[in-house]
Amino acid sequence: MHRDPIPFVDLSAQQKAIDAQLRARIDGVLAHGRYIMGPEVAELETRLADYAGVPHCISVASGTEALLISLMALNLEPGDEVITTPFTFIATVEVIVLLGLTPVFVDVEPDTCNIDASQLEAKISARTRAVIPVSLYGQCADMDEINEIAARHGIAVIEDAAQSFGATYKGRRSCALSRLACTSFFPSKPLGCYGDGGAIFTDDDDLAQASREIRVHGQSARYVHTRIGVGGRMDTLQCAVVLAKLDRFDWEIEQRKTVGSRYRQALDEIGIASVTVRPDRDSVYAQYTIMVDDRDALQQRLTEAGVPTAVHYPTPLNEQPAYKQFGEAGETPQASSLSRRVISLPMHAYLDADTQADIVTRFGEVIA
Ligand SMILES: *Cc1c(COP(=O)(O)O)cnc(C)c1O
């Protein structure tokens, strides 16, 4: 058996496949020289809005910026509460706290690792203004149930779709399922650029306008600052990179799903539990994540066997030093348990069957 290094995410294989489009797109930007808000920005926004099936897409500097600007567009007040999951990347809760809002944590489902919609209503108070479900690992949360509860209480829903752009939920696409949605083009996300980038999606004209203004320092006309904003634009060059990748994106999603089902079958056979994907939706497998006992020891042995892994996430955010003031000890037992048991395996659209079989073989040897 060969012992070549196996990449966790293979961006170079993708780059080879799109080389011609990439160079043409980048040359186009170098030729016109409009590095900020050049024509590729609007072109990308139109393509992404059409893809998701939403009237408005606003490109921004990162997924984190997308979450920040979305919350700013809602005009919340310090002390207002925003409900989210503790089992996510730090950015989801960071932006809440940065704006002086109070995060309130709802536990996750033990099989999908997404926010448990059945526990949402109990955490809604008179001060709750928004809920940010995270579509973790590439699979949408229970958006219909969440939207229904939120509508009854008059609170906004922002899908954190940083990992799920391209996923479908009951025949609709992630980012088209709630009042606002945010995605990320961090290089290793399912649709990535070559730096930082992100986007906000909304069906609401006023929130779209507010987001566009906040993205450029709250400017409604040149040097007229109608509201407080940020420097949150996405570079023209990064938009060009995403455009170069878009034609292949559906094919890549299919490849990811093929890799996902091969893992699921092989791991089922040896009794290893994978994150569940519900039958009414799919996953774009931003990560292929499994649950195991003795995770840290397994990770060590997989590293020694040449199988790179990652842990998303080793600590629930309500147990992080800077955030535990917002949580109550033991309030989210599923998130705590999962944080000790989850581990993600190599996953990308260019993972061929032989390499994947090799990964599964090495995995089997390590747990034998
Ligand atoms: C990656 C990610 C973000 C942040 O995106 P950046 O583009 O890195 O700022 C936010 N939320 C989740 C769930 C993510 O995975």
Image (cartoon, rainbow, N blue to C red):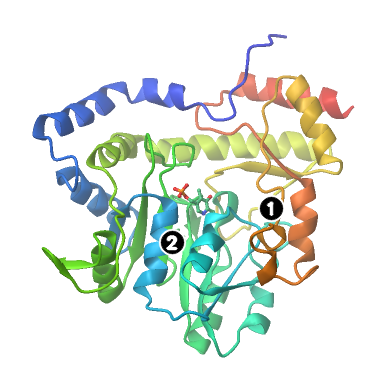
Q: Earlier in the sequence, mark 2 or mark 1?
A: 2
Picture coordinates of residue 200, whole percent (x, y)? 36, 60
Q: Residue furthest right?
A: 368
Q: Is residue 1 left or right of residue 55?
A: right
Looking at the picture, tell me which residue is in the foreground, 151 or 76: 76
Q: Residues within 10 Å of mark 2 (few under 14, many from 20)?
A: many
Picture coordinates of residue 234, whole percent (x, y)? 29, 48
Q: Residues within 10 Å of mark 1 (few under 14, many from 20)?
A: some
Q: Is residue 43 left or right of residue 231?
A: left
CA–CA distance in space, label 2 to label 1: 26 Å
Picture coordinates of residue 83, whole percent (x, y)? 58, 73
Q: Residue furthest bottom?
A: 126
Helix, strand or loop under label 2: helix
Q: Is residue 304 above or below residue 336?
A: above
Helix, strand or loop under label 1: loop
Picture coordinates of residue 27, whole percent (x, y)? 18, 26
Three-letter code, disc 2: Leu
Name which residue lies at 80% across and 41% down.
272
Q: Quadrant of the C terminus?
A: top right
Name which residue lies at 57% across and 36% down.
258
Q: Is mark 2 within 8 Å of ligand 1?
A: yes
Name which residue lies at 53% across and 60% down.
94
Residue at the disc numbered 2: 67
Q: Residue 185 sits in which quadrant? A: top left
Q: Residue 271 sits in which quadrant? A: top right
Q: Which mark is residue 83?
A: none
Q: Is residue 286 left or right of residue 272?
A: left
Query: Is residue 356 in view from this perspective?
Result: yes
Residue at the disc numbered 1: 276
Name which residue lies at 52% across and 56% down.
91
